[in-house]
Amino acid sequence: MLDVGDAVPEVGLKDADGADFTLARYKGNPLVVYFYPKADTPGCTNEARDFSALAADFAALGVPVVGISKDKPAKLKKFAEKYGLTVTLASDEPGDMCEAFGTWVEKSLYGRKYMGIERATFLAGADGKILRVWPKVKVKGHAVEVLEAVKAL
C-alpha cells in the first residue's frame, strides 16, 4: 500500500459518465482519494453519503474528494443518483489504480480467501505526494476524521 511521501499514481480512470480522467486533474490542490469495495452496499453507501454530506466543507478548503471502486461507470452513475451523492465517483474496472495504490488485496470471509478492495483513504498534498493514509477504514466517523486532517493542513 502506498505510504506517506509516495506520489499519487497517474492511472487512467472513468468517471460516472464514462469520461476518461486521471487524478492529475487535481494537481495543485490537496486531494482525498478513498477506495471502497462495491457501490450500493451498506458500508460503501454510508461512506459515500458521509463524504457527500461534508463535500461543501471539503470544497471550501479547496480539497476535492474522489471515491474509487471497480464498479462500471453506469453503476456508479446510478449509485450517485439513487443517494444524491456529490463526491466524484471513479471506475477502476481494470483494477490498475487499486493495484497502484495497493488496495487490491487478499481478503478472507468465513475461511474463504478472495481478492478485493481494502477500504482505505489517502490524503495527498498539492504536490501530489501522500500526506496521510487510513488503511482498513471503519466507516462510522471516518469522513469527519478525514475532514479534520484536511483542516490541520
Image (spheres, rainbow, N blue to C red):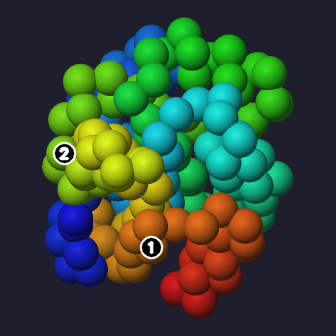
The extreme bottom residue here reads 152
Q: Quadrant of residue 114?
A: top left
Q: Amino acid at mark 1?
A: Trp
Check if mark 1's residue and mark 2's residue have beta carbons within 8 Å.
Answer: no
Residue found 30% across the figure and 72% down from its top:
130
- Secondary structure under tag 1 reads strand
Residue found 66% across the figure and 48% down from its top:
43
Q: Which residue is mark 1?
A: 134
Q: CA distance from mark 1 to mark 2?
A: 17 Å
Residue 79: give x, y in percent of width and height.
Answer: 68, 23
Q: Nearer the viewer, residue 100 or 104?
A: 104
Residue 53: give x, y in percent of width and height.
Answer: 82, 53
* Count of numbered tags: 2
Residue found 59% across the figure and 89% down from its top:
152
Q: In the drawing, does residue 7 fall left or right of residue 112? A: left
Is residue 6 visible in the rendered image? The answer is yes
Q: In the drawing, does residue 52 fall left or right of residue 91? A: right
Residue 24's label in the rendered image is none
- Figure check: 61 above or below 45: below
Q: Nearer the viewer, residue 101 or 150?
A: 101
Residue 99's label in the rendered image is 2
Q: In the drawing, does residue 97 fall left or right of residue 38? A: left
Residue 76: give x, y in percent of width and height.
Answer: 57, 22
- Figure check: 50 above or below 148: above
Q: Quadrant of residue 112?
A: top left
- Figure check: 14 above or below 107: above
Image quadrant holding the N terminus, namely bottom left
Residue 17: give x, y in percent of width and height.
Answer: 53, 13
- Secondary structure under tag 2 reads helix
**Sequence-wise first label, 1 or 2:** 2
